[in-house]
Structure formats: structure tokens, C-alpha cells
Image (cartoon, helix red, strand yellow):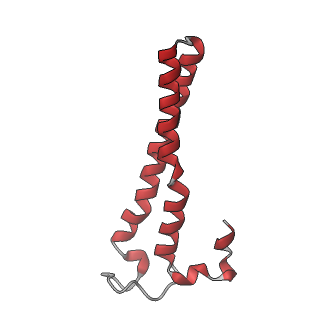
Amino acid sequence: MRERTRAAPEATDPDPTQEPLTPAKIGGPIVRLHAAEALLQRAGQALDVASADPSPRRIAEGGIATAEAKIASAELPLDASTTLIELAGTHSTRNAHNLDRH
């Protein structure tokens, strides 16, 4: 972004690094990542409890917590890569950047 000279047509600042919506766009995937990390931690704790007390209820709670963490994290890579392309612009998809390989 620092090397771009054109901002998006709806931008309020010609310098894309100074665009006020940029932190919000970057922050969204970061917030979702932190939420997924917290759910993963919670799932690990629920599985530890189920391991110590393998009752049907505890096992079900561990499974549900694991599914919640999976759901929360499943879309993160796609969201992050989409945000990267949005912020970097269409020129970021050029072969020279190798972003198609990540």
C-alpha cells in the first residue's frame, strides 16, 4: 500500500495509507482471529474436562466447543486474503507478487 499512488475512487485521502477505513478493514480479520483463538482455548479446556470426566454431557460439551472453534476459524484465511487484495488493489494479483501461491 505504501507504494501505491492511486487510492480507491471512494477514498477520502489520495494516500492509501492515510485512508481512515484502512485500519477498520485490517482490524476486522484480526478481531475475528482473536475470537477464534479464544474459542479454540475454550474448546481445549472443554476437552480437558471431558478427558478427566468422560460423561456423555462433558463429551458433548467438548464436541460442541470444538465445532464452534472450527466454525469461527474456517473463513479466516479467505477473509484475510480478500482483505489483502482489497487493500493492495488489483495489481497485487500480478504473478510477480506470487500471492496466488499462498
Q: Compared with residue 33, is residue 8 higher up or lower down, i.e. above or below? A: below
Residue occupying the point 36% across, 63% down: 24
Looking at the image, the residue that sits furthest to the front is 56
Q: Compared with residue 32, is residue 69 higher up or lower down, i.e. above or below? A: above
Q: Count of labels shown?
A: 0
Camera sees residue 91: yes
Residue occupying the point 69% across, 69% down: 101
Residue occupying the point 51% across, 47% down: 73
**Residue 19 locus on image (x, y percent):** 36, 75
Camera sees residue 42: no
In which quadrant of the rendered image does the C terminus lie?
bottom right
Say left or right for 38 vs 12: right
Q: Compared with residue 42, is residue 75 higher up or lower down, i.e. above or below? A: below
**Residue 17 locus on image (x, y percent):** 43, 76
Q: Compared with residue 14, is residue 72 higher up or lower down, i.e. above or below? A: above
Residue occupying the point 51% across, 15% down: 56
Say left or right for 78 vs 27: right
Along the viewing direction, whichever of 21 and 15 lies nearer the viewer: 21
**Residue 89 locus on image (x, y percent):** 50, 80
Q: Where, by quadrant of the figure, is residue 10 drawn?
A: bottom left
Along the viewing direction, whichever of 38 and 20 lies nearer the viewer: 38
**Residue 46 locus on image (x, y percent):** 51, 24
